[in-house]
Amino acid sequence: LTDRRKTDHVRLALSDPEADRRKHYFDRIRLVHRALPEIDLEQVDTSVEFLGRRLSFPLIVGPMTGGSSAGLRRINETLAAAAEECGVGMAVGSQRVMFDDPASRPSFRLRHLAPNALLLANLGAVQLNYGFGLSQCREAVEVLEADGLYLHLNPLQEAVQPEGECRFSGLADRIGEVAGKLEVPVIVKEVGCGLDVRDVEILFHRGVRYFDVAGSGGTSWSRIEHLRQPAEDGHDLGLVFQDWGIPTPLALMRLRAWRERVVLIASGGIRTGMDMAKAMVLGASACCIALPFLKAAEESRKSVTALIESLRREFRLALFLLGVARAVDLVGAEGLILDNPFRSEANASG
Ligand SMILES: Cc1cc2nc3c(=O)[nH]c(=O)nc-3n(C[C@H](O)[C@H](O)[C@H](O)COP(=O)(O)O)c2cc1C
């Protein structure tokens, strides 16, 4: 990924009002309100432990960027400092750029700004079919002094780009090799189309234990890539597929039987602390939010911490109104669901 491409991504994600699809899928799910919560609001413990780090509540700022330009570096530094201040996690965007352009490395050297925060490295899984291997994965982790490595799967995003890398065959074995040898956990994610049962099953048998469903409903990469480079023949491939994918709540529900064996992270269109609580009831142990943090980071570190604090207040209030005293007790607590229209869809198919 060149710096240019990342800069374009950031610009388009910020300027196109429809890059965020705003499907609000989590609004369709209602949880059981307790008029008598039997706990004090202040008593609610929102903290969780995740990958060996304590989070003040189960939020990870989603992987977005990094590069040699001052702007991209500042975004990462702002997010890392805010994550440390607020006790949440942070992931960096694809570190592939680091191997083409050494000047981009400082944008991934964030540990000094976030000595206690959960930090996650990131590479495109498909790169493992294009010459990358364990040593690049290791280097990505080392530069960030990361607690884990995100490997993202983005077949749609690649396919709508003229220069896209679409050789996905044999990839599961490569991912498995890395997961088996890397010193920190590998977390496989999508980028907004969702992971499903088959994907998790194949990777589980190759040793992967962490999955971020990254479903649809939020940022659309198909749309952003289309806007970045409309096809010369006028074919709107990226627009046709802009809402392709598995809605995040449905992806979580379809993975219900896997909850005992793998750790699930929810992302894709999560926009409030209430959404986070719902994602956890559906089985996620933590949540990732990307695009809203890009907007905040462009403004200031203060905007980022304000966003995190709003999310935390919403999350705390949701727990209070559910009568749940500890965030850990939310995970997979289906008794808290009042009404979930996705239920019939999930059951019908899996
Ligand atoms: C500007 C931007 C850049 C992104 N770059 C990456 C990336 O490099 N690696 C990755 O795994 N995901 C990347 N993503 C995807 C997000 O991490 C996330 O999976 C997706 O945007 C859905 O979450 P959201 O709806 O909260 O934005 C990016 C998202 C945005 C908005």
Image: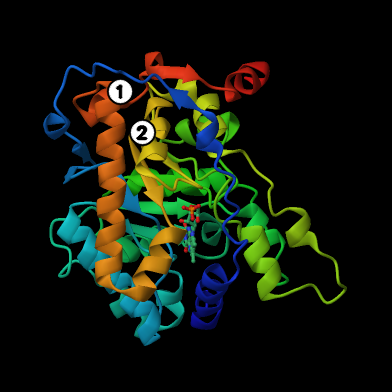
Judged from this view, the residue extending furthest toward the front is 35
Determine the secondary structure under disc 1. Answer: helix
Decide which of 192, 104 is in the foreground and name it.
Answer: 192
Tag 2 or tag 1, which sits nearer the N-term? Answer: 2
Question: Residue 170 placed where, x, y %?
Answer: 60, 47
Circle 2 is placed at which residue position?
A: 277
Judged from this view, the residue extending furthest toward the right is 233
Question: Residue 139 placed where, x, y %?
Answer: 32, 66
The alpha-carbon separation of the residues under discs 1 and 2 comes to 10 Å
Please state which amino acid type lies under the numbered disc 2: Ala
Q: Is residue 143 visible?
A: no
Please state which amino acid type lies under the numbered disc 1: Leu
Q: Quadrant of the C terminus?
A: top right
Residue 162 occupies quadrant: bottom right
How packed mark 2 is, by other alpha carbons closer than 10 Å (few <14, some 14-19, many 20 or more), is many
How packed mark 1 is, by other alpha carbons closer than 10 Å (few <14, some 14-19, many 20 or more), is many
The numbered mark at residue 322 is 1
Instruction: Assess whether mark 2 and mark 1 are in contact (beta carbons under 8 angstroms).
Output: yes
